[in-house]
Amino acid sequence: DQRGLGFMDAVKELADAAGMQVPAADPRAAAKAERANTLYDVMTAAQDWFVTQFQGLEGAEARAYCEKRGLKPETNKAFGIGYAPDSRGKLKEALKHFGEEKLVEAGLLISVDDKEPYDRFRGRLMIPIRDPRGRVIAFGGRILGAGEPKYLNSPDTPLFDKGRTLYNLDKASAASRASGRVIVVEGYMDVIALAQAGFGEAVAPLGTALTEQQIIMLWRMVPKPLLCFDGDSAGQKAAFRAAQRALGGLKPGHSLEFVTLPEGMDPDDLVKKSGARAFGALLDQAEPLVERIWKAELAAGPTSAPEDRAGLKQRLGTQLANIADTEIRRHYADAFAERFDMLFARKTRQPQNAAQRKGPWRPNSNAPAPPTGDAKAIGSRGPDLLMQGILTALLSEPALLMRHQEVLSHSVPRDSGHARLLSAMLDAVALHSGKETLDSAALLTILGPDLYNMAQALLQGDGTAFGFVRKRADNGEMARGDAFGQLDEAIRLMKQRPELEAALQRATEAAGFDLTEESFAEQQRLRAEKQAFDARLSALLQRDDLG
């Protein structure tokens, strides 16, 4: 827990400390583990050698660079900062006892055709990359003078897969448990500068865009990692690519959030200029993934013409198609629709200025009266109560499920138990399609124990007063004529209600944001429509219509 290790990594570390070997699964795995152990020894020796060079005469330029970047000696030591001299063979000579083959396999030497292998890292500040157990598996080298590439990473090796590794994960795991967050930045120096400023929970990808596997690793640490890429155009594009990659793996409660830095600044710049408190304030203002996707697509093209707005919808639809989880995809679609309607409703209903108005603006005197107490009561408990009545009627007459199958299959009850019951009922009817008629008793036998109990409670209870579920006093059968007609009406209301409530909410928000005659009139129109809806629902709740 304290080190932030996974179970097997913790077992292996304890085994190493005790001088024991964790048994391998098979001989091939044992041989691979043995080879890896040798490579770990190679990387540890290389790390020790780079640190020694950093502290020696040849490391003066590297130490001066760290001092210029504001890094303290204790920070250099904590992150194992080293130096690779500008030589093609000094490391090879220092580690020759491992053999050239192992040094090439570890990515420390470059071997081209039949030429003599030579040192990969030359004249660079060396930053060790560790695995979750803190073992050195690769290096990142930053050039000290002019030249390209500015950063050079180890190649992929048996120890190192850059798409499945996050820099500083070993230290950040423990820190993130304490802070409850993890911060993803672009580079090594940002991570090191943030740790020195008190943000030890920072990690970075390794010279590539954030991969799906790295996002999964982040989600194992916290539900909503914070992406804090540079404020320039390249940094923001990288953040958007990460946002797109995250969509396919979204699951309930897990997402990404985005921290926007001032243009042209990286986290290191911001901490130096404004201090840790300013950076912490930006973290508190992180933007959710849905907002980042919306803003990026909105900025991707013009929106003035109808064709432009259709293009925006198409781009948003493409993003939605990338979301695998159906429930999350539905909520994203709702969020995009609300933003779209709010934005373009405002654009088409510009307020009049005072000179254009013919006298002071007043609400329309024909606005509907406020809802009655009964309507308010129905509105507050209507969705669950209405679905309860519909389910009870369908349990009594399963044949009606086929009649309303299309509407019901697109309905998502707010109560999770109702949702599971409706789904099971639709599945049962689909399985019996073309077979004998499915009656109430047969349907009940198909349901699992928990759903069976729920269904029996609905059928035996009198918690609903809808006419279409009331029973005749004389023979206990439903009054089919009026009852079936009322059930049709109830299902129509169930379908209409979410759309009407969403439209009324958008109109109310639009009026609150930009109160004009047009926005107020639209709000009142929808309020009247909602009042008429509640009246129709109230009619279904009359207690004596079938008695």
Image (spheres, rainbow, N blue to C red):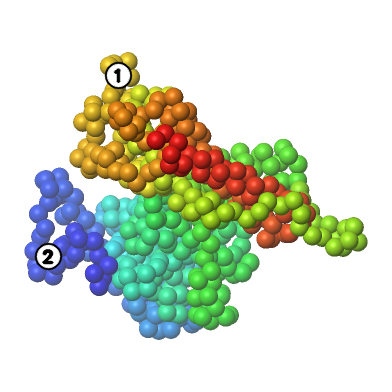
Q: Secondary structure at mark 1?
A: loop
Amino acid type of the residue that numbered disc 1 sits on in the rendered structure? Thr
Image position, residue 328 (x, y; %): 44, 47
Image position, residue 141 (x, y; %): 43, 65
Which badge, 1 or 2, is on the more N-terminal residue? 2
Image position, residue 115 (x, y; %): 37, 50
Residue drawn at (56%, 74%), measured in percent from left and top?
269
Give the vertical position of 390 relative to 59 (above or below): above
Q: Which quarter of the rendering shows the N terminus?
A: bottom left
- Between 249 and 435, the residue placed more toward the observer is 435
Classify 10 Å Cα crowding around label 1: few (below 14), some (14-19), many (20 and above): few
Residue drawn at (29%, 23%), measured in percent from left and top?
438
In the image, 116: left or right of 440?
Answer: right
Residue drawn at (50%, 75%), measured in percent from left and top?
280
The circle on residue 457 is: none
The circle on residue 15 is: 2
What residue is disc 1 on? 437
| Residue at far front of view | 474
Amino acid type of the residue that numbered disc 2 sits on in the rendered structure? Ala
